[in-house]
Image: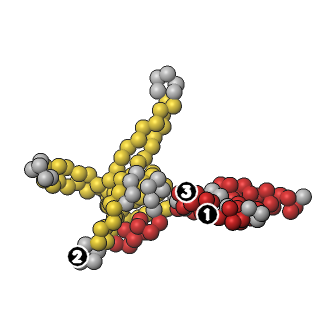
Amino acid sequence: MSTLRNKVQLIGNIGSEPKITTLENGNKLARFSMATNEYYRNAQGEKVQSTQWHYVVAWDKKADIIEQYTHKGKEVAIEGKLISRSYTNEMNVKCYVTEIVASEILLLGSKNDSVNTNEIEVKEAIEEPQNKGNKEATTATKTPQTRRTQSRKNKTEKTA
């Protein structure tokens, strides 16, 4: 039980693009906000969503993982410890911050989550006119869900 004194486990979505900083000594730091959602029914029986925001800090190799594989909206699981610190801002006001220092990061969701939808739309706009007669080339640039649906249809047609 002594290992559970300061341990936090969260599953949620990254709320803002991670800010990556490389320090003078070569250490890498990633900072990002994370949203966790909880659902409950109110007195009227309506489903209500409650969102909590957390600030996460990741160092070195974990910061590399955050930089390379995550983006705003990506679902992740974080394990770490809580730290509280204070600082004085530009207006000479003392601010208090509670952050989670990540010791473990698990990327969740499908692999297709890492594909930026804007990139797919740009590819469609560029490739569609060139490939009007080629059905396969056109479907290869559609959204990930459409691609999966199309490949299932092709498999079904082949087996029939």
Q: Which amino acid does label 3 sit on?
A: Thr
Placement of the C terminus among the 4 image quadrants = bottom right
Label 1 and label 2: CA atoms lie apart by 42 Å
Label 2 – label 3 distance at C-alpha: 35 Å
Tell me which label, 2 or 3, sits earlier in the chain.
2
* Residue drawn at x 87%, y 61% as measured from the top left: 159
Residue 21, position in %: x, y? 30, 68
Q: First in sequence, mark 3 or 1: give its number.
A: 3
Q: State whether residue 10 appears in this view.
A: no
Q: Are marks 1 and 2 in contact (CB under 8 Å)?
A: no
Which disc number belongs to residue 126? 1
Of helix, strand and loop, which one carries label 1?
helix
Q: Mark 2 points at which residue?
A: 24
Q: How far apart, in angstroms, are the residues tagged by discs 3 and 1?
A: 14 Å
Image quadrant holding the N terminus, namely bottom left
Which residue in the rendered view is the most extreme toward the left? 92
Q: Which of marks 1 and 2 is in front?
A: 1
Question: Mark 1 Cα within 10 Å, few/some/many (few <14, many 20+)?
Answer: few
Question: Which residue corresponds to mark 3?
Answer: 117
| Horizontal side of residue 41 vs 85, given as left or right | right
Q: Nearer the viewer, mark 2 or mark 3?
A: 3
Residue 129 percent coordinates (x, y): 68, 62
Q: Residue furthest bottom?
A: 25
Q: In this view of the protein, which residue sits in the foreground, 4 or 118? A: 118
Q: Which of marks 3 and 1 is in front?
A: 1
